[in-house]
Amino acid sequence: MINKIVASAAEAVVDIFDGATIMIGGFGEAGSPIELIHALIDQGAKNLTVISNNTGNGHVGLAALIENLQVKKMICSFPRTAQSVVFPELYFKGMIELELVPQGTLAERIRAGGAGIPAFYTPTTIGTPLEQGKEIREIDGRSYVLEYALRADFALVKCKTADRYGNLIYNKTARNFGPIMCMAAKTSIVQTSSIVEPGGIDPENVITPGIFVKRVIEISHPLSENQLLKENRRYPW
Amino acid sequence: MVNFSQIKGWSHDEIARKIAIDIPDGSYVNLGIGLPELVASNIPEGKEIIFHTENGLLGVGPPPPPGQEDDELINAGKKPVTAIPGACFFHHADSFAMIRGGHIDYCVLGAFQVSESGDLANWSTGEPNAIPAVGGAMDLVAGVPHIFIIMQHTTKTSQPKIVKQCTYPLTGKKVVKTIYTNLAVIDVTPHGLEVREMYPGLDKETLQNLTEAKLNFRPKS
């Protein structure tokens, strides 16, 4: 029998090892798997490379993981948001590396990684400082840069509904990087607000097919990052 | 001579309205963060425009009433929005396929500088002590055929923002189609910058003095 449901967030992240590469879903707060990230803080794996669009807010979730000095390198498109206070401090002290990737290139590098495509050409960054060091090729009269696929050891993703096969549906703009990160990681770990029996999700409506998912953990009432920020909370509590 | 530091020109909403008028009915449009967001509230009645936000929504509606915000329904600026009837959600790779694949018709962005050949600088001022952050801007200018810029004509210290060559790091080369400022509407053409419309009462010489790049004036303007 296939049953990808695990009992706790701690169990879901137990084998994340020092030096692992981890994709973390979310665009700002929307889709950020905050309980899984907090479980990873409790677990303590270090020297992580994290691939995520932003660098977290305040002192919870991804920002708390960075503040706990578990991340040696961030690969992201927009590390400088209004509420990102932890990353800038460590960056200016030289305590964390940054690989800046345009958002669409980031998404496509992840998608390619999950689809078995090692690299691709894209027009994004041509004529800008971010093209430096990249192979450039002219195709049909236009210039493109070569970008390499991204893969990860683990992905941490949040969704709305899952079944024991790992079929997923998401909630509104919290979908963002979730589906492609599940594809690009060897072990994708998903927190879901609810679990249904197989067949409880109409096959026509499945967004992430279960084959891309390894573990599912039910977090029925996930914390609101916005609310935690308003209350000025820090993790570990 | 006119004291041009006192010319306010069109309001932000008036500039946004000009852009909204120039975007054809039925277009798919992506709006940048900040000033460009004003275009959405200035669409003339009877015109149907579908707004795209790169974090995975086609059919962005107006902001929700206070108290009805949803942390998981936001725009690229991470502000709460609504979804119109007929909207759809999708993941990031699909969203940027819409952008890079040329499916989004128009994009409205802010700018630090625009050059006379349509080069755009809007992601970094190149200061060594700033953390670089690029987001989706470079993908948008690489993929969307019509890039419109909305901005003040000059900086707060009256320095020109429409320049011969951008001094800030580029977002893209030769990508801007039209610049909408508080003082003028300027098309980027193969023959240089062409002023299509000027703020009433402003004269050509004053506008040129506030612009580093050479302006060409259409007979009508």
Image: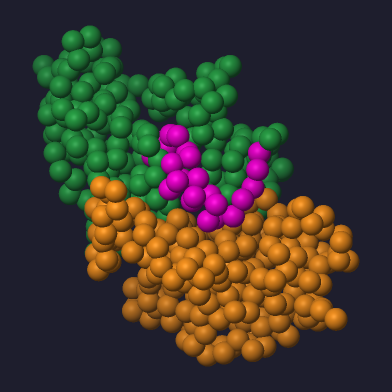
Magenta span has A62?
A: no
Where is B157 relative to B44, above or below? below
Name the image quarter holding residue A14: bottom right
Q: Is residue A155 left or right of residue B149?
A: right
Name the image quarter holding residue B143: top left
Q: Residue at x 64, y 89 (%)?
A: A15
Q: Determine if residue B126 is in view.
A: yes
Foreground of the two, B28 or A56: B28
Q: Residue at x 13, y 34 (%)?
A: B212
- The location of residue B2, given as percent across then percent down, is 15, 17
Where is A114 relative to B40, above or below? below
- The location of residue A113, given as percent across then percent down, is 50, 70
Q: Determine if residue B183 is in view.
A: no
Where is A51 relative to A78, above or below? below
The chain coloured green carries which letter? B
Q: Residue at x 82, y 78 (%)?
A: A3
Q: Quadrant of the N terminus of chain A?
A: bottom right
- The location of residue B101, given as percent across then percent down, is 45, 46
The chain coloured orange carries which letter? A
- The location of residue B33, given as percent across then percent down, is 45, 43
Q: Is residue A216 left or right of residue A183?
A: right
Where is A190 relative to A12, above or below? above
Write the start and end of the magenta stretch as one range. Answer: B87-109
